[in-house]
Image (spheres, rainbow, N blue to C red):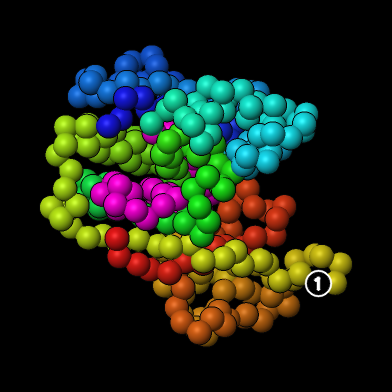
Amino acid sequence: MFNSIALVGGTHGNETSGIQLIRNWQQFGLPSRFNELNISLNIANEAALNANVRFVEEDLNRQFTFDRLASNNLAKEAVLAKTLNEKFGPKGNSNTDFVIDIHNTTSEMGATLIILEADEFHIQLARFVKQQMPEANILVEDEKPYLEHGYLCTTGKRGVMIEVGGQPQGVLREDVYLLTQTMAEAILDFCVAYNNQEIKTGALPACEAFRLGENVGFPLNRDGARTAMIHHSLQDNDFKPLLPGSPMFRTFDGKDIPWDGEKETYPHFINEAAYFKLDVAFATSERITL
Ligand SMILES: [Zn+2]
C-alpha cells in the first residue's frame, strides 16, 4: 500500500524535465485520477537549479549511502542530503513509501525507468509501465543491495528513477518533457492500481529489460588525455545491440576500436555529458526478461 509518495525533480539542477513537471503540477495540479494518492511534489537542489548546474559542490545523487549520511562532510550537497534524508527517510526506516526521482540524460535513452531491485514488486511495476508505454526502456541496477546505493530515491521504502533523454543540460525540450510526464503518470497509475489490489503479475505480459553491466571508459594516453571519441555508429544507439567486433571508438588518428566483448552488449548513457570528468564513455547491459 502506498500511503505516501514523493515525486522529486531537480536532484540535478540542470535536468529540466523533472523540474518543470514538478513546477507545472504545483501550479496546475496533478491529474484528478491521482487524487486518491498522497503525493508530495519536491525540488531537491534549489541552489543548483538557480545556478543551472548539476551540483554546486558535490553530486547530490551520490550522497545517500549510510556512510556519507553519517559523515561530517560540509559540502553543500552533503549537508542538503541530510536534510532530504530527514524529509523523505530516514533511509532504512523511511516515512515515505515510494520516492520517484526524475532525471535527464544527454544520451538518447528515451524514457528509461531505472529500478534497483528485480523482485516481484518491481517486476510488476516494470511490466505495467511497459504495457502503458511500450517505448519505455527498463534498466535494472541491482548490482548491489538497494540500501547500498547512494541515490536520493533510496531514502524511500522503495525508490525508482525516471531518466529521459537525449536532452542537453539546462535545455527544456518538449518531446523529452512529454516522455517524462507520460512515464511519471504511468508510475502513478501503477500506484493507484496497486493500492486497489488490481495488479497481478501473471496478468501482465513479461517485458524486456536491461541489466546494468559495467562502465566502459574512454581510451586515455599516459597523460590521462583522451585518444578517441565515441564512434558515429555507436552514438545515439542506446539500448541497441553492440556486437563483438563492431566499432565503439574512433581514435583521433582515424582508427576504429571495436567492442571486444565475447557477446553482444546493450550500451546506454552513451557520451553522457555528466560523466565527462569521469571519462566514462558508456555503460554496458545485458538484455533480460522481467
Ligand atoms: Zn540526473
Q: Which residues are magenta?
A: 98-126
Relative to 108, 69 lies left or right = right
Q: Position of residue 188 (x, y in %)?
A: 29, 33
Measuring 60% from the left and 64% from the top, which residue is drawn there? 215
Q: Amino acid at mark 1?
A: Asn
Whether residue 146 appears in this view of the structure is yes
Q: Position of residue 133 (x, y in %)?
A: 25, 47
Label 1, on which residue?
A: 221
Judge whether 43 appears above or below 102 on screen.
above
Q: Secondary structure at mark 1?
A: loop
111 drawn magenta: yes
Residue lying furthest right: 223
Judge whether 127 appears above or below 182 on screen.
below
Residue lying furthest top: 27
Q: Position of residue 37 (x, y in %)?
A: 27, 23
Measuring 50% from the left and 72% from the top, which residue is drawn there? 233
Relative to 182, 168 lies left or right = right
Residue 10 image-quadrant placement: top right
Q: Position of residue 60 (x, y in %)?
A: 63, 36
Whether residue 189 appears in this view of the structure is no
170 drawn magenta: no
Residue count near mark 1 (Cα–Cα under 10 Å), binned few <14, some 14–19, many ≥20: few
Judge whether 34 appears above or below 164 on screen.
above
